[in-house]
Image: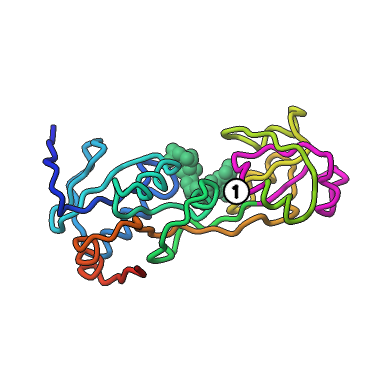
Amino acid sequence: MMHIIYEPERQRMAIQKSGRLHKASMDFLSARGLIFPANDRTLILPCENFDIDLLYLRDDDIPEYVRSGVADFGIVGENVLAEKGADLPIIAKMDFGRCKLVIAAPKDSRIRTPEDLGGKRIATSYPKLLSEYLAREGIEASIVPISGSTEITPELDLADAICDLVQTGSTLKAHDLVPLFTVMESQAVLIESPLKKQAKERFLSQINLKSKL
Ligand code: PRT
Ligand code: ZN
C-alpha cells in the first residue's frame, strides 16, 4: 500500500482509469519521458521522475476534477468536455480517441433529413449535445436519456433513432443502423485547470508543452 503525502508543488494529472483512452494516455506520457511504477490498482499513481501524480478516474469525472483544480491537468475526449459544458483551456489535441457523435436510424426507417427527426424519440447518453444540435436545426424531438448501449434501443422500440459515438461503424452495422447526421467530431485532448500555478508551467515546459494561459 502506497501512501501519498500531499505536496502543494506536486502536480496531478487526471486520466481515464480504464477504457478506450487509458492506454493511449499512458503511452503519451511515457513518450514524453514520464516513468510510472507498474499499476498496482491504486487510484493515485506517483510519477518516478517528475513531480506529478496520476489520478485514475471515470472519464465523465475528469472535467470536474480539472475545473475545480483538484487535478491540474487531464486527458479526456472533447465529447465529454462539451457534454459537461466544461470550457477548459486545451493545451494539446492528442492523436487518439477520434470518433464522431452521430444520429443514426434503422436501415428501413423513413428518416432521411434532419427535419424527419421532428416528433421522433432519440436515445442518447449525450442529451446536452443532442438538444443543442436539435435547437440549431430548429427541430422538436424527444430525447430519451440513457447511460449506455443506445444501439439496442430502436430494436426494443424505446427510440426511433439514436445519437451515439461511432468509430469504425461496426456497432451500428451490427444493429442495422445507418449513420445520418454528425453532431460533433471529437478526439482526446490535454486540458489544464484554469487555476494558474507556477508548478504547472514548470511541468509543461519540462515535457516540452506550452500552456496557453
Ligand atoms: O468507465 P468510463 O466512464 O471511464 O468509460 P466510458 O465507458 O464512459 O468510455 P469509453 O472508454 O468507452 O470511451 C472513452 C472515450 O473514448 C469517449 O468519451 C470518446 O472520447 C472516445 N471514443 C472513441 C469512443 C469511441 N471512439 C467509441 N467508438 N467512445 C466510445 N465508443 C463506443 C460507442 O459508444 C459505441 O458503443 O464504441 C461503439 C462504437 O464503436 P465502433 O468502432 O463500432 O463504431
Ligand atoms: Zn464514461
Q: Is residue 106 above or below residue 9?
A: above
Q: Is residue 118 left or right of residue 196?
A: right
The stretch in magenta equals: 102-130
Circle 1 crowding by C-alpha within 10 Å: few under 14, some 14–19, many from 20? many
Residue 77 image position (x, y, % from top left): 47, 53
Q: Given the image, on which type of amino acid does mark 1 rest?
A: Leu
Quadrant in the picture for residue 155: top right
User: For residue 123: magenta?
Assistant: yes
Is the residue at mark 1 in contact range of ligand 1, meaning its CB lies under 8 Å from it?
A: yes
Residue 98 image position (x, y, % from top left): 52, 58
Depth check: give the residue in front, 172 or 67: 67
Residue 99 image position (x, y, % from top left): 56, 55
Residue 125 image position (x, y, % from top left): 59, 39
The outermost residue toward the front is: 195
Q: Residue at x 57, y 33 (%)?
A: 147
Query: The residue tagged with tag 1: helix, strand or loop?
Result: strand
Depth check: give the residue in front, 35 or 92: 92
**How is the structure coloured here?**
rainbow
Q: Residue at x 31, y 53 (%)?
A: 26
Quadrant in the picture for residue 140: top right
User: For residue 181: magenta?
Assistant: no
Q: Is residue 66 left or right of residue 47?
A: right
Q: Residue at x 38, y 50 (%)?
A: 67
Depth check: give the residue in front, 162 or 142: 142
Residue designated by label 1:
165
